[in-house]
Image: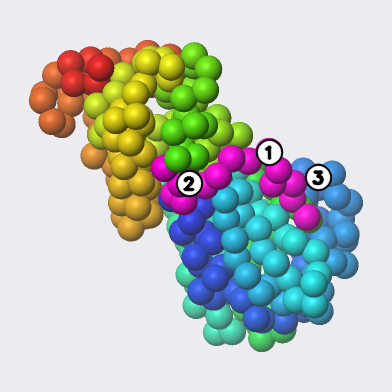
């Protein structure tokens, strides 16, 4: 599932290639992806306008439109990508890495384009989503999201992460606490910080929390730079025969916060 780094690559594609282009037509006919809005409602709100800013908090992405128009929300679901083409059809894309299939592969099924904006210059913006788990809407509610994992202040992070008695991994995954951390980024961050994912947050002191925040920031920046959380140092070792890439100990598997979790039982304490 796309986490903060993948969503940031999609946002960057929109910011780079889709802003300030007049919207000539919109295909919002997929009633599942655009639910609960009926077909035509998003189109009526966008045609004639331009996207003027691409924003993101955690895994949530939205675009402001011209003339104080409605806000377009775009969610990548489990495997979505954003594809933007120029007037000549040359694409740029970002989002979830599509293993073995690019969003512009000639053998892709056009039905996987779940939402399309056609620009007056001939280019398009598409939500490419083979699994049909993405969402598109208008005027998203952001009030339930915590601060972005890549931008949260240290003082705010310490307060939010230390409340209660939850396991530290479960707290990292709570989007109302910190927005943007998914299962892989949580495992990578905790491995970098050498913290046991089961560790209760009320046992973390200030030093632990500061180390955790530094690890989260570093893991997030590195994943954005490399194209996704799948590039993390420990991610390839999250498997039954995996070994910690630092000390060589066999990786341990558990369920924390309802999610499959891999960690080094020797170094993560």
Magenta span = 139-154
Mark 1 vs mark 2: in front: 2
Q: Is residue 156 left or right of residue 138?
A: left
Q: Quadrant of residue 267?
A: top left
Residue at left offset 56%, top offset 33% = 177
Marks 3 and 2: in contact by CB < 8 Å? no
Query: Label 3 neighbourhood size at 10 Å, few (<14), some (14-19), many (20+)?
Result: few
Q: Which of 187 and 79 lies nearest the eye of the viewer?
A: 187
| Residue 109: image location, x then y, percent | 59, 55
Mark 3 vs mark 1: in front: 1
For mark 1, what is the residue? 144
| Residue 80: image location, x then y, percent | 56, 49
Q: Earlier in the sequence, mark 2 or mark 3?
A: 3
- Can you tell which mark lies on residue 35? 3
Q: Which of 157 and 118 lies nearest the eye of the viewer?
A: 157
Q: Is residue 265 left or right of residue 83?
A: left
Label count reads: 3
Element under disc 2: loop
Residue at left offset 13%, top offset 30% = 246
Element under disc 3: loop
Q: CA distance from mark 2 to mark 3?
A: 31 Å
Q: CA distance from mark 3 to mark 1?
A: 20 Å
- Can you tell which mark lies on residue 152? 2
Res 170 visible: yes
Query: Label 1 neighbourhood size at 10 Å, few (<14), some (14-19), many (20+)?
Result: few
């Amino acid at each position: 599932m796309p986490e903060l780094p993948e969503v940031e690559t999609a946002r960057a594609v929109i910011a780079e290639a889709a802003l300030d282009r007049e919207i000539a037509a919109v295909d919002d006919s997929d009633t599942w992806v655009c639910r609960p809005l009926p077909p035509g409602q998003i189109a009526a709100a966008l045609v004639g306008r331009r996207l003027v800013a691409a924003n993101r908090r955690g895994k949530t992405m939205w675009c402001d439109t011209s003339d104080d128009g409605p806000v377009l929300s775009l969610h990548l679901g489990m495997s979505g990508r954003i594809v933007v083409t120029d007037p000549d059809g040359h694409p740029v894309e970002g989002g979830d890495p599509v293993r073995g299939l690019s969003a512009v592969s000639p053998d892709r099924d056009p039905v996987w384009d779940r939402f399309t904006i056609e620009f007056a210059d001939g280019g398009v913006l598409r939500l490419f989503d083979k699994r049909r788990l993405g969402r598109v809407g208008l005027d998203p509610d952001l009030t339930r999201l915590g601060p972005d994992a890549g931008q949260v202040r240290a003082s705010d992070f310490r307060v939010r992460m230390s409340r209660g008695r939850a396991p530290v991994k479960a707290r990292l995954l709570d989007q109302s606490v910190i927005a943007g951390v998914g299962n892989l980024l949580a495992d990578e961050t905790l491995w970098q910080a050498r913290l046991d994912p089961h560790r209760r947050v009320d046992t973390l002191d200030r030093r632990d929390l500061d180390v955790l925040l530094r690890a989260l920031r570093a893991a997030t920046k590195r994943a954005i730079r490399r194209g996704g959380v799948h590039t993390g140092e420990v991610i390839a070792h999250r498997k039954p025969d995996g070994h910690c890439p630092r000390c060589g100990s066999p990786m341990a598997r558990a369920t924390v916060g309802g999610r499959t979790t891999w960690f080094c039982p020797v170094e993560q304490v």
